[in-house]
Image: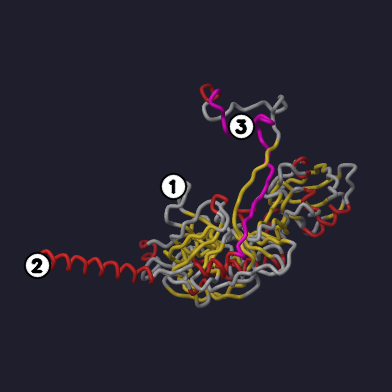
Amino acid sequence: MKYIARHTTLWCLALLTLFTAQLAQARDLPDFTQLVKDAAPGVVNISTTSTVESRGMAGSPFGSQDVPDIFRHFFGDQMPPMIPGAPGYGGSEERHSLGSGFVISRDGYIMTNAHVVDGADEIVVRLNDRRELEATLVGADKKTDVAVLKVDADDLPVLEMGDSDALEVGEWVAAIGSPFGFDHSVTSGIVSAIDRTLPSDAYVPFIQTDVAINPGNSGGPLFNLDGEVVGINSQIYTRSGGFMGVSFAIPINVAMDIADQLKDSGHVNRGWLGVVIQPVSRDLAESFGLDGPRGALISDVTDDSPASRAGLEAGDVVLSVNDDRVEDSSSLPRLVGRVAPGEDITLTVMRDGERRDLDVTVGSWPDEGKAVTGTSKKDDSQVRLGIAISDLDEPMRRQLDVDSGVLVRQVDPRGAAAAAGLSRGDVIVSFNGQDIEDTDALMEAVKDAPTDRAVPVRIVRDGQSLFVALRLETEKQE
């Protein structure tokens, strides 16, 4: 009996020790309760509506993608193409999407992802107090996937911004968003890695986390334990369509810089060198006299670009931008991109086995200028045209062989421009007899144009000049 009692006592002590250890471990885990109470009012749900053309049967309950079982036996998963002009051909359908966002100013500015509102005809923001407000797109930058919206409201709850540069791997973080439309869902995890580069996003040093992120979380805030926003949840890595333990957030320091530019001018100016780069392998590093595979190898230099004017050559390996080391080829676009156009930088390059310092005056990206980004139904000329445009800088004018004009960057298939035959890449050089110098001139010409007849528009396409007849729609009264 003494033996049994002694072993029973030891067993109870072991259980008590284990229970005590578990309690201590539980006390060490972060408590997000107060963080959520403080931050939730500043997190919003974003819903968008867009109208897309359908080449299926207009009015069909299953559209052009979902095929009823009765037809699947004959046609598989796709309906046969219909003949344009035949009964039932064409039509349009509304598409809806959901995302998240957060308030960055008391007077109604809201930040989200650019892909959340891309192509939206209508944007509705639902606040934590269940108010629903129509939002206007102030501007969106697809390169960083950041967008800024504006709602007509005052005294909104603003989230506190943190310092994403201070984040460390292993640090606890939390997300609030609307996965699958479930408003203000909270998930947590740790920072898995920092400064991640994804193949399609050369300008963002992503924060990688294991926080559960799913469709609908996009655009929502990522918080540190102090309740400060340190990132915008943007992407996940998945093979199933759902969360698999790897998610990516845009650092808030990067996002706020983009947001400030969008609020000021509606577009982003980022630095440009005019070079084609590639990674440096071990063999290439040895051949160029480097002690290891680092830096960005220039494989080509654009004519009359900032790089060519500064004397950069194919075969140069860029090792640093000012005092920042270029660890790999993906680092160079980010380091140059955050420099304002017109500023001077010093590049340290390896050429013929020797280091050289070259001073470069950074240029502006050729495809960026006064991009038309508004989507409000109360918008003006660009909505009537149905296009997105940008100004041409001098290198682009030479490349396109035009003296002036504006570049057509995107065409709404339902707009007046598409009906006239305008395409992406066209350069508008005159509108209704007026020479077009820049986007402002085109917008003014559109405002003054008649709506009861077609007007002539001269464009340059593939080096050839031609006229198209464009008929503007009458502006809708609300």
Looking at the image, tell me whether mark 2 or mark 1 is earlier in sequence order: 2
Figure disc tally: 3
Give me the residue at 81% from left, 53% from top. Answer: 381
The image shows residue 439 at horizontal and vertical percentages of 77, 58
Looking at the image, tell me whether mark 1 or mark 3 is earlier in sequence order: 3
| Above or below 224: residue 389 | above
Determine which of the numbered discs, if any, sits on residue 62 in the image: 3
Q: Residue beneath label 2, please?
A: 2
The image shows residue 392 at horizontal and vertical percentages of 72, 59
Q: Which residues are magenta?
A: 41-70
Give me the residue at 61% from left, 75% from top. Answer: 344
CA distance separating discs 2 and 3:
78 Å
Q: Are marks 2 and 1 in contact (CB under 8 Å)?
A: no
The image shows residue 295 at horizontal and vertical percentages of 45, 67
Look at discs 2 and 3 and give the one toward the viewer: 2
Q: Nearer the viewer, residue 366 or 12?
A: 12
One can see residue 117 in this view: yes
| Above or below 68: residue 411 | below
Amino acid type at image mark 2: Lys
Q: Residue beneath label 1, please?
A: 239
User: What secondary structure is found at the residue carrying circle 2?
Assistant: helix
Q: Is residue 243 magenta?
A: no
